[in-house]
Amino acid sequence: MISSVNKKHPHSSFPRFLLTLILPAVTLLGARPVKAVVWSTLFTAQDVRDHLATEQGRQDALAFCRKMGVTKVYIETFRDGYQADEATLKAARDFFRQAGFEVSGCVTTVRVHKPSAGGHSWVCYTNRQTQERLEAIFRFTAALFDEIMIDDFFCTDCQCSECAAAKGSLSWDQYHEKLMLQVSRERVIAPARAVNPRVKVIIKFPQWYDRFQDRGYVPDKESAIFDRIWVGTELRDPASGEWGNKQQYEGYFIYRWLTDVGGPKTGGGWFDPFGTTPTLYLDQPLTTILAGAPEVFLFHYGALTSTEYQAQAEALAPRRAQYEKLATFVSDWSGIATYKPVSSDPGEEAYILDEIGMLGIPDAPTAHYPDGARAAILTTQALGDGELVPKLARLLSAGGTAFISQPLAHRLNGDPRLPAPAPLDLEKDQYLKTVQVGGGRLMVFSDALPHLTHVDGQNRVEQLTPELRSALEGLRRMVSDFTVTLPDAPPRVAIYSLGGRVAVVNYTELPVACHLTGLAGMAHKLSQIYALDGANLAPDGATLRLPPHAALVVE
Ligand SMILES: [Zn+2]
């Protein structure tokens, strides 16, 4: 076993905890083992119309669900201005219930009366008729289902004349936050409960966590008022600028970060086939399960059975059992506390926390300042905490280490509350700098290091110069004082610290051989406990060999 030297993450997944408690009893009774993962899918309102209106259509949908291991379905009442027919919704609901499925509802708040002046798919929630239509949709849905998922369009950037008049002296961010909370309480949750006192309403958050504050998503306050939360773990082709060159680690970062916010209300992850190849699609269940999602939501039936994306579903179906097995090894996430306060602005560093993870440095994402931690990763996002500097000074005076991004170092430079003996800014062509401050140390790392994880439109990554290689090694050496890392892996190989276990995933397009450090002085041989797609631990018990997109778990 590998001992975990870092502060254990405060919230483990509540449903998994329950599973642990009930598993022995179930086993004694001789029942089937409790599954570590529930697979679910969605029938959008258009899928309901196009695929669930006939007995044959429902039978085809059932066959798809059986093939994919799906045991829970969400049947959507409204999307994109269209409300599904009530009789069809009831027939579909009852059909799946009778087939032994869990059945919930879903609403997607696109084209609900007045569009946002911002030009996205979002709507203007200040408008009274929008609010009344929204309320009617949730009343209709709550009469049919005891649980309602809200897809991640429940936000707004509207700055129309009605919104401008209503916001008064608030900033736009403040107004959108206030508006979305008010509409959630008064036009969604209260009317749904008035119709169906048993109803549970789930808010699903999009994967673009560094932009929530611009569009009225407030995960801490929304987690408090909704019954459950859901996490968008959608990944895209990292070479595609159309999707923002997404790093695969994002699915892990956001899931763990929102679990820190939502605690036991966090219900699962959600991804789709868009912007993926079958190989990239499979990075999604892998990363979502490594992050600890007890339910994996496959969006959506109509897409996954279309000629465009059915290859993605075909790729997943035969591998379900392997992912379910992986889930049994996943718990006790740790790493270096990586602090992003709720509603924090990323400045010029949007999604840098995903890139740090892709450098083989395990993030322990947290929305709360990691008091008592021996080390922390701090970027511009951390300035969302107005008390950051005194907190950082306390970490340093206790002998701690702070890994500081270059833009944050620039903004901390010259702050009298952090009396540094030297400027924190890096010099030209300098990639790393350690400054002793107040009994601890600040390690400033250059933008050039996280940028090593970027993939360009031709699927190329930057070549490691000797200077960059040496800087990356230096950063990882410092990281290995606190957690496990990969001293010799190329960028885009990620490591997940799971209690006494370590999972490594090769997100590059080439085979990789690498080693682990930071095992807290334990030198004995590793054992392989799980391998996906030809990964293996060499007979020396130390060398991890991973083909592209393969995963290995050792202890
Ligand atoms: Zn408006």
Image: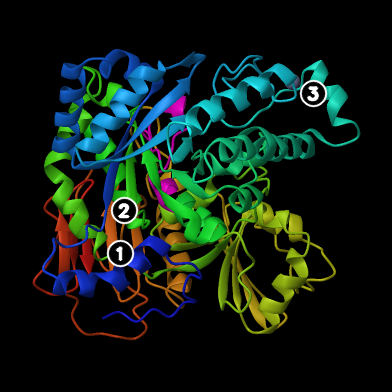
The x, y position of residue 166, in whole percent, is 85, 27
Question: Magenta span covers which residues?
Answer: 234-252
Label for residue 330?
1
Q: Earlier in the sequence, mark 1 or mark 3?
A: 3
Residue most extreme to the right: 169
Question: Which residue carries the number 2 mark?
Answer: 289
Question: Which residue carries the number 3 mark?
Answer: 163
Position of 465 relative to 397 (above/below): above
Give the amino acid type for the residue marked by disc 2 in the picture: Ile
Position of 514 relative to 500 (above/below): above
Q: Earlier in the sequence, mark 1 or mark 2?
A: 2
Give the amino acid type for the residue marked by disc 1 in the picture: Val
Which is nearer the eye, 367 or 421?
Answer: 367
From the viewer's perspective, is the residue at label 3 or at label 2 nearer?
Answer: 3
Q: Residue at x 42, y 51 (%)?
A: 267
Q: Residue at x 22, y 74 (%)?
A: 25
Residue 411 colored magenta? Answer: no
